[in-house]
Image: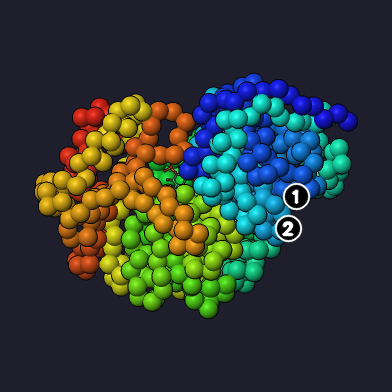
């Protein structure tokens, strides 16, 4: 077998964002583009010689081709072994688990997560470190630097490896082990949750609908929810992963999972509904007639954790990303545990989890997880809810009502303005940043600004500092507006506006969030001049 050295040149823009490198698939398919980035990962981590890696992806278009390239480049780099999911499939949390379980040197996840897939849509690559989590900023910076100085890459010339069957093979001295993508992950879930109790729940007639959105969680959900837990056949829908996610947008939110929302709001709705995203790390949770916001879900999981075997001993602490609502903060206060506020992106939870400072963490973007892996985990969250429902035997709506009564309610919504002109979006942020210090004491409609700042994070474990993590406007009365530009989009800029208001008055706990937040929404537009600067009068997505 020959290992080839191919001359190449740096390619602009290979800077990892919130979650790896994400671009249009056609860009990834461009000459040397993918190979350059993989070689830059190898270079950025000091080479792969003698190392063991995990490899898998969400099954989107180009996943299979890209996996073959990674294998040939790992072999050329002298890697000892690559553990790869059958058909190059692994959900992001399952990949994180395999990295940890096998004490490997990290892994490559091929995914653009909730972004659509296909030749004209998106593709992505992420490197996870030996702790199983997304590479921290120090590592992604080294990878980015390597993309800027690359002059050659190395690749073994070979036929495609058979990834369709579980088993071992060899490529130029490197061992390739194809594994069942579900088995180890399922075994882990069985150590966390009370499967017997959940089985009894289904046996009692409990009905659920899990929408896998034609993405990677289909096989996981079928094996766990239908086969192991006895959910009736048909509980899992859209359960076969497809390269273009059935032409859809595998993002579990009320817009893209509208079919599920409609069914859960209908007369004959099942007891519980859930959905997951392209790579299986996000979750959406619904009860009959009720949508649970991800921020509320995080708060409920923290409040009810003792009902789950793995968390019976209590939580070390909790963490949430900065724009996530502060509903979980009050639960932490009542439980007497620490609550950390981190920048957006799961990589910032890694140190806190590794240091044992937190057990559960979450983001408003439909991500919740715990110290069982180092990624957010969609199915884990769904099983957590099932375990709670099996113990309390309460409808989701009642559970939420009780939660708000005890802790108060953080009305919350995120408004996304997608594919906005990048210049206009940056100008909006720059201008607002320049005016932050003048805003305190100003009144905008019904909202009075208490203070305003730009969020920066000092990691309490390694002391690293991350700046420029979002503009925050604190309102008197406890409300909050946050402005950020997305770091995962592939077209223009996406402006995210996070809106929150806190209500403790028992008579005002059951309003529609968009109505309850009307004053905050109007103030957000007025403060930043969204309509005026972007030309948009309404957001593309409200979650
Ligand atoms: C978004 C979310 C963030 C999440 C990230 C990756 O990032 O806001 O909370 O961690 O996506 O999620 P941004 O920079 O676009 O706001 V996933 O499921 O796409 O890996
Ligand atoms: Co995802």
Q: Is residue 499 above or below residue 197?
A: above
Answer yes or no: disc 1 within 8 Å of ligand 1.
Answer: no
Residue at image position (29%, 60%) is: 410
Marks 1/2 in contact by CB < 8 Å: the verdict is yes
Left or right: 61, with 258 as reference point? right
Rendered image coloring scheme: rainbow
x, y percentage for residue 199?
Answer: 60, 68
Residue at image position (30%, 48%) is: 454
Answer yes or no: disc 2 within 8 Å of ligand 1.
Answer: no
x, y percentage for residue 46?
Answer: 68, 44
Residue at image position (77%, 26%) is: 5
Q: Secondary structure at mark 2?
A: loop
Would residue 484 be seen by someone viewing this image from the given angle?
A: yes
Left or right: 84, with 412 as reference point? right
Left or right: 304, with 503 as reference point? right
Residue 279, image quadrant: top right
Q: For this rendering, which residue is in front, 404 or 460?
A: 460
- Around disc 2, counting alpha carbons within 10 Å, would you say few (fewer than 14), some (14 to 19), or many (20 or more)? some
For the residues labelled 1 and 2, the Cα–Cα distance comes to 9 Å
Residue 259, image quadrant: top left
Q: Is residue 425 above or below residue 356?
A: above
Q: For this rendering, which residue is in front, 252 or 393?
A: 252
Would residue 94 be seen by someone viewing this image from the given angle?
A: no
According to the image, label 1 marks what residue?
52
Q: Label for residue 102?
A: 2
Q: For this rendering, which residue is in front, 215 or 127?
A: 127
x, y percentage for residue 240?
Answer: 63, 42
Q: For this rendering, which residue is in front, 12 or 345?
A: 12
Q: Is residue 461 above or below residue 486?
A: below
The quarter in which the N terminus is drawn is top right
Closer to the N terminus: mark 1 or mark 2? 1
């Amino acid at each position: 077998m020959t290992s080839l050295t191919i001359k190449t040149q740096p390619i602009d823009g290979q800077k990892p964002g919130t979650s790896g490198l994400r671009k249009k698939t056609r860009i990834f398919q461009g000459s040397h583009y993918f190979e350059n980035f993989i070689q830059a990962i190898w270079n950025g981590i000091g080479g792969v010689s003698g190392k063991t890696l995990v490899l898998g992806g969400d099954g989107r278009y180009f996943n299979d081709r890209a996996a073959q390239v990674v294998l040939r480049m790992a072999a050329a780099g002298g890697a000892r072994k690559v553990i790869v999911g059958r058909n190059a499939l692994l959900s992001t949390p399952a990949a994180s688990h395999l990295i940890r379980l096998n004490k490997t040197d990290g892994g490559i996840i091929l995914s653009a997560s909730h972004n659509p897939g296909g030749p004209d849509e998106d593709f992505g690559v992420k490197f996870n470190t030996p702790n199983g989590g997304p590479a921290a900023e120090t590592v992604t910076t080294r990878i980015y630097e390597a993309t800027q100085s690359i002059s050659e890459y190395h690749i073994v010339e070979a036929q495609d490896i058979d990834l369709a069957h579980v088993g071992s093979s060899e490529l130029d001295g490197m061992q390739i082990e194809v594994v069942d993508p579900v088995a180890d992950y399922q075994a882990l879930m069985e150590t966390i949750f009370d499967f017997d109790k959940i089985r009894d729940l289904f046996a009692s007639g409990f009905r659920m609908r899990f929408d896998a959105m034609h993405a990677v969680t289909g096989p996981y959900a079928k094996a766990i929810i239908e086969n192991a837990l006895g959910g009736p056949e048909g509980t899992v829908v859209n359960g076969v992963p497809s390269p273009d996610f059935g032409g859809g947008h595998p993002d579990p939110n009320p817009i893209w999972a509208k079919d599920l929302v409609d069914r859960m709001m209908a007369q004959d709705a099942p007891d519980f509904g859930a959905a997951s995203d392209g790579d299986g790390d996000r979750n959406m949770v619904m009860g009959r007639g009720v949508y649970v916001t991800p921020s509320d879900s995080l708060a409920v999981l923290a409040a009810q954790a003792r009902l789950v075997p793995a968390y019976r001993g209590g939580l070390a602490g909790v963490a949430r990303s900065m724009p996530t609502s502060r509903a979980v903060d009050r639960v932490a206060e009542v439980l007497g545990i620490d609550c950390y506020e981190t920048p957006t992106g799961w990589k910032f939870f890694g140190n806190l989890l590794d240091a044992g400072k937190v057990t559960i963490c979450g983001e408003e973007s439909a991500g919740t997880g715990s110290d069982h892996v180092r990624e957010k985990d969609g199915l884990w969250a769904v099983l957590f809810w099932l375990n709670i429902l099996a113990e309390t035997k309460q409808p989701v709506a009642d559970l939420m009502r009780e939660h708000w009564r005890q802790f108060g309610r953080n009305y919350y919504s995120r408004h996304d303005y997608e594919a906005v002109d990048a210049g206009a979006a940056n100008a909006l942020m720059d201008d607002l940043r320049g005016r932050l210090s003048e805003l305190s004491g100003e009144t905008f409609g019904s909202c009075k600004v208490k203070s305003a700042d730009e969020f920066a994070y000092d990691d309490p474990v390694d002391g690293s500092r991350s700046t420029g993590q979002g503009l925050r406007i604190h309102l008197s009365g406890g409300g909050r507006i946050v402005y950020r530009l997305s770091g995962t989009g592939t077209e223009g800029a996406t402006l995210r506006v996070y809106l929150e208001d806190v209500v403790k008055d028992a008579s005002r706990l059951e309003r529609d969030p968009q109505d309850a937040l009307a004053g905050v929404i109007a103030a957000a537009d007025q403060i930043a001049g969204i309509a005026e600067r972007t030309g948009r009068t309404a957001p593309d997505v409200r979650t």
